[in-house]
Image (cartoon, helix red, strand yellow):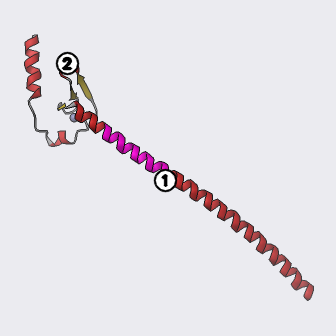
Amino acid sequence: MANKEDNVIQMRSHLTPKTPSNEQRYCHHSHITVVAEMRLLLCNDCQLWIEPFDYLLGWAQKDWAAEQIAKQHRKEVEQRYKEKIKLKREERNIKARLKRLKSKLIIYEQSLKANQ
Ligand SMILES: [Zn+2]
């Protein structure tokens, strides 16, 4: 059974900087453990220590990027809505013009019949 002193040594050994393996370099550290007494974070997936500020910064950058994408999507939705309104107006105008042309055609056909 480990005593308190063993835990201290074990903790220090974990603090030795490690060069991340290729697998660890691509870890998104999505499952972490907060080690409050050391003020550090530990990735449960790759077992690397994570500097809390780096983790927070990464989180803030992802949040900012997601917000930019959301803004772009909202802008596209708004633009598509404006295009839809414009197309509906054009459709109404074309239908009205077609109706006027049909009326003129009927009048023209009636005048042709009357002249025969
Ligand atoms: Zn990780």
Residue 22 place in picture, x, y as percent: 16, 43
Residue 2 in view, yes or no: no
Question: Which quarter of the frame holds ligand 1?
Answer: top left
| Numbered circle sitting on residue 37 | 2
Label 2: which secondary element: helix
Is 8 situated left or right of 86 in this image?
left
- Are circles 1 and 2 on residues that touch, CB within 8 Å? no
Residue 28 as seen in the image, left or right of residue 19: right
Could you say where residue 79 lies in the image, as x and y percent from the top left?
A: 53, 55
Q: Work out whether 44 lies above or below 111.
A: above
Q: Residue at x 65, y 60 (%)?
A: 88
Nearer to me, 93 or 113: 93
Q: Earlier in the sequence, mark 1 or mark 2?
A: 2
Residue tagged by mark 1?
76
Given the image, on which type of amino acid does mark 2 rest? Glu
Q: Look at the image and give the residue range highlighted in magenta.
A: 60-74
The residue located at (92%, 84%) in the rendering is: 114
Quadrant (top left, top right, bottom left, bottom right) of the N terminus? top left
Q: How many numbered discs sit on the rendered protein? A: 2
Label 2 environment density (alpha carbons within 10 Å; few <14, some 14–19, many ≥20): few
